[in-house]
Image (cartoon, helix red, strand yellow):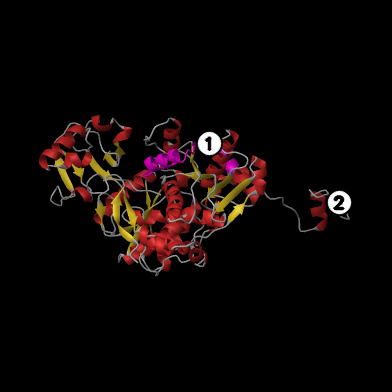
Amino acid sequence: MIKMKALVCRECGKEYPTKAIHVCEMCFGPLEVKYNYEEIKKSISRKKIADGPDSIWRYIDLLPVEGTNFVGPHAGFTPLVRAKNLGGYLGLEQLYIKNDTVNHPTLSFKDRVVAVALTRARELGFETVACASTGNLANSVSAHAASANLHCYVFIPNDLEAAKVLGNLIYKPHVVEVEGNYDDVNRLCSEIAGEHGWAFVNINIRPYYAEGSKTLAFETVEQLGWKTPDQVVIPMASGSLLTKIWKGLHEMKSLELIDSVRTKINGAQAEGCSPISTAFKAGRDFFKPVKPKTIAKSLAIGNPADGYYALKATAESAGAMDMVTDEEVVEGIKLLAQTEGIFSETAGGVTIGVLKKLVKQGVIKKNDVTVAYITGNGLKTQEAVIDSVGRPVRIQPSLVDFEKTFKMGKNGGGDT
Amino acid sequence: MIKVRIPTPLRTLTKGQGEVEAQAGSVWEMIEALNHAHPGMKDRLCDETGELRRFVNIYINEEDIRFLKGKETSLKDGDEVSIVPAIAGG
């Protein structure tokens, strides 16, 4: 079965071959994969999916690769956690956390998109892969490139968290720290990509790469028993993830895997970098780029490539967008950790902070089946919380000292 | 003179050149000058109403013109301009 018909411009509809290109030559619009849905419909079924591997590749019929020589065979199929404690705290009866803090192998949702991107890059014959990244993407590209024996260059801003820098170096790619913010890195990489024949996963491989995010929608629906949630809360950087979750839900409907999509799509940003949420709240369908200033560095994209489409998807779904302060981000991280035992990076703090706000505003209601997407692991952004989690209690290695410290009597006693 | 870096999708208009020169006092004048030297350039960069297309990004000495004065931003001798299509991301 030929799944991919062409690449097609989202703006003017011009078609291109399924190569490593991402921009329409005529109008500069982004290119997207055009699938042969009639053929896919004949072979896809709930059963076929359920019988597939415990990874994103169970949805291979809707992913833009030709073969099964996968880079990243274990990405995805992360837990959908019923969050009773956090739900109770917020006043939600049916809250779920889609927990991509435990994605394989680099603990963020980027393992999904990179698995797709590098599988496709290898199919297209590339030997060198690269990316512009706020951290998680670079970690995932570095790790997957190591396992697939590909040459690798990752470009990052010069102010990243220590663990996100180390999380590249350990795999020994070329790590290029660019003096500037992500938008500077991104512009530079767009120019480098024009000169060197590499597979830049989020530039010339982007039409394939971005499709990997749909698997977050597919998994959510399958894990809810083939039902769509009423509300989702999604962190936004470039806006691509939100756009693709919306697309994934609609693909499932058009392939009759589900009856209808009633999901409201809600987008979350940090106040220090909220071009998309700001535009949405002002009722605009276009955004103004900003210079990011927030601890949520993985979301610090001031010129979001899919901002326009994220605004459109949220409006179409009758959803909402909002933003939170850095203090609320830290509170969100701690709240999720202390209620559900899930340690998220700053982006998750943004998601939980905005979830809390939307519940308070009455946008998300008590009985709504709600899914919050937690896309990265807290061990990578320790700087954000290190000063607000206290210190261990230090004692001598003696029973007496222990019981004294915790004011315990001899037989049992206090349980501080 | 200003230097203008041309992205791959527009190089069919510049006979493959990745960098061209132009004489212009503003971004707007630069687009006109490029169009004069490389016919068809304006249609690619601007929509029917003459506004820059949604996915076209222009930088002067590394600064996005949307942080400056957009198309009205002035240019001086020695400035370097980059045209970057559909910034990616993530």
Is A302 positioned to the left or the right of A162 in the image? left
Q: Nearer the viewer, residue A327 or A78?
A: A78
Is residue A191 at all visible to an observer of this figure?
yes
Which numbered dot is residue A325?
A: 1
Q: Amino acid at mark 1?
A: Thr
- Check if mark 1's residue and mark 2's residue have beta carbons within 8 Å: no
Is residue A173 at all visible to an observer of this figure?
no
Find numbered disc 2 in the image and state the secondary structure of the residue it sits on: loop
Say whether disc 1 or disc 2 marks the residue closer to the N-terminus.
1
Q: Which residue corresponds to the image point at 37% horizontal and 55% vertical from the top-left?
A: A131
Q: Which residue is label 2 attached to?
A: A413
Which residue range is magenta in the image? Answer: A304-332
Q: Quadrant of residue A38?
A: bottom left
Locate the N terminus of chain B and report the quarter of the image it occupies. top left
Image coordinates of residue A200 in percent, x first then y, are 33, 56
Is A86 positioned to the left or the right of A51 in the image? right
Question: Taking A387 as reference, is A39 above or below it?
Answer: below
Q: Nearer the viewer, mark 1 or mark 2?
A: 1
Q: Residues within 10 Å of mark 1 (few under 14, many from 20)?
A: some
Q: Amino acid at mark 2?
A: Gly
